[in-house]
Amino acid sequence: MSAAVELTAITKRFGDVVAVDAIDLVIEDGEFFALLGPSGCGKTTTLRMIAGLDFPTEGSLKIFGDEVGTLPPNKRPVNTVFQNYALFPHMNVLDNVAFGLKMSSVGKAEARAAAREMITTVQLAGLEARRPTQMSGGQQQRVALARALVNRPKVLLLDEPLGALDLKLRQEMQGELKRLQEELGISFVFVTHDQEEALTMSDRIAVMNEGRLLQVATPEEIYEKPVNRFVANFIGQTNLLEGTVENHDTVCLANGARVAAPSEHATGTAVAVSLRPERAHIRDRGDIPPGETSVDGIVERITYLGNARVYDIRLDWMTMEVREENRPGMQVCEPGTDVSISWDPSAISVVTD
Amino acid sequence: MTAVEAPAADEEVLEVTPEFEAAAERQERRRGFLLALPEFGYLTLFFAVPLVIVVVYSFATRNRFGGTDLSGWNVDSYVKLAEPLVREIFFRSVWLAALTTVICLVIGYPFAYYLATRSLRVRNVMLVFVMIPFWTNFLVRNYAWRVILGNDGPLTKTTEFVGLGEHEYLFTQTAVVLGLVYGFLPFMILPLYAAIERIDRRLLEASRDLYANGFQSFRHVLLPLSMPGVIAGSILCFIPSLGAYVTPEILGGAKTTLLGSYIVTQFLTARNWPFGAAMSFVLMAIMLAATVVYFRKGGRTL
């Protein structure tokens, strides 16, 4: 069985600008796959190339083993949920959803029947005669989904599908998309700049920046073992403690302190130790549990989040963030207190540029 | 509740009651009306009044000396409209105007689409090109066409040279249509451009993604969404073509008398003002009715 989508050395240039730079990527059938990155990183261009809305400048693009590089979008077994939906404003919901089937010369009656069924699946039954402009953002989102899925694509592409929705609705739709994907068993490839969304929904995530693919892995791996500084910083919050590799077990930090940090890098390599705010703990100065590594600092600021407090701790050479869950009986440090920050050696990862 | 003795008058001012809002709205409307007053005045004086004069004259009588007697009101002029000659001129005019409109649409649509999809810089330059002809007098431009189409002109020379034989263009219906298309093409392009430019390009991409080929995408998405431009452009082309006077007069021959020329003849040569007025009025009524129907029909498909 060949992969759902296979990109080999795909490059896209717009004039002098390299939007996508020789990326290799394999997306398996039945996978919920996220293309994640800041705006302008090439993730949307990559998706558009899979859809056939842009053609790669170089490289090979296969969908289920068939080379589709320069095939127009109407000849590819994929469908897209566009950013802001791109619903046809001059058609009602039913005609919007039936559009794809009508174009692929399925009979009108049959197309309508299939469209009605799909409209029911996305819980919009009864709204067939509405115009898209008469619907809420969430409903439009469902129409866009139905319009793509009714064609039974082999791969569904979603471009920032939830970007225009408010938080509550977005969370609801996240669950629904996941459920739909599991039900249909096809792969969903979605583009997002929202790392939380990518972590919540995806089986695997590809992190992109400046046209390059930085890391392709499961959400856990991306979060726990980021390959470089950018990934560590982009996915979730982190503290990056600059230093150089001393040996395979130790990194010498900028202030001269040595911390246990296993890595494969050669001695002398400039690295950063990535420490997630929730993996570190605030201790009374010097009161370090055995086996943990620590640095000393002063509490500068406390941000109350309800379920947690975030402490900004000033060290000699930088400021660190530590997040403490808000459990009953928690001792709260006042700003100005001398404290130590400690962590288990397994909590960190060593990253390079 | 009643312990605090607030002055009733103050309370009324502070509270935003429905009455207060309605009053504000009324005031707003009054202000809008005042702003539009010069326009209303102009239209009344120079559009409505002349139109009334035309209507009045159409029911008047032509006297023996070619003058018009504002007495003995009758509908003779309207009856005269049914004469075969008038009918022939009318249908010829409609046919040529329709032909002009269709040609403008066929030429103008691809160009407008091209224009709407260029970068802003290219668009602006090309829009200037579209409008450059307006900087030269319309009459002069029509005479220029006379040179182009003339018997010893470049067009005849070219067809002769490539072996298509000798053709006469000037003073034919072809020449008139060419001239009309030339004259009114910008009026087709500009509204089409405005309409197409407004369409979200992603809708076209979405249609292609949903298995529409290029033509289907045009037929089911681009065309219906650009219908306001098609309608506006067609009206702006058809109506002046139907009543055109200068172009048929300069490029057309005696055999191709059109409504515009015929009406002018009634006033200047035949000195039958009532008949000319009746014909003008009916023409206007027909165009108005056609416009309303066209808009209604267009409105349904939008």
Image: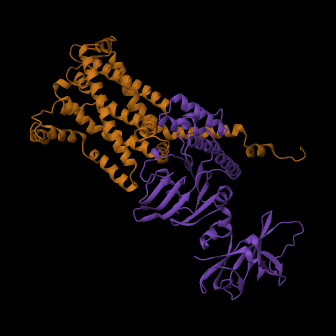
Chain colours: A purple, B orange
**Residue in the picture at 40% in, 48% down:** B116
Residue A261, percent from left and from top: 69, 80
Residue A19 seen in render = yes
Q: Residue furthest bottom?
A: A256
Q: Residue at x 33, y 53 (%)?
A: B125
Quadrant assignment, res A124:
top right
Left or right of B15: which side holds B120?
A: left
Q: Quadrant of residue A290?
A: bottom right
Residue B170 x, y percent position in the rendering: 15, 33
Residue found at x 19% / y 22%: B269
Residue located farthest toward the front when viewing the structure as drawn: A1
Q: Is residue B293 left or right of residue A174?
A: left
Q: Is residue B63 left or right of residue B38?
A: left
Q: What is the quadrant of the C terminus of chain A in the image?
A: bottom right
Residue B5 drawn at (x, y percent) = 86, 46
Q: Nearer the viewer, residue B24 or A166?
A: A166
Residue A227 appears at what percent x and percent y? Answer: 61, 71
The answer to whether one can see residue A297 in this image is: no
Q: Is residue B63 above or below residue A24?
A: above
Residue placed most toward the observer, A219 or B202 = A219
Q: How many discs mark residues in the rendered view?
A: 0
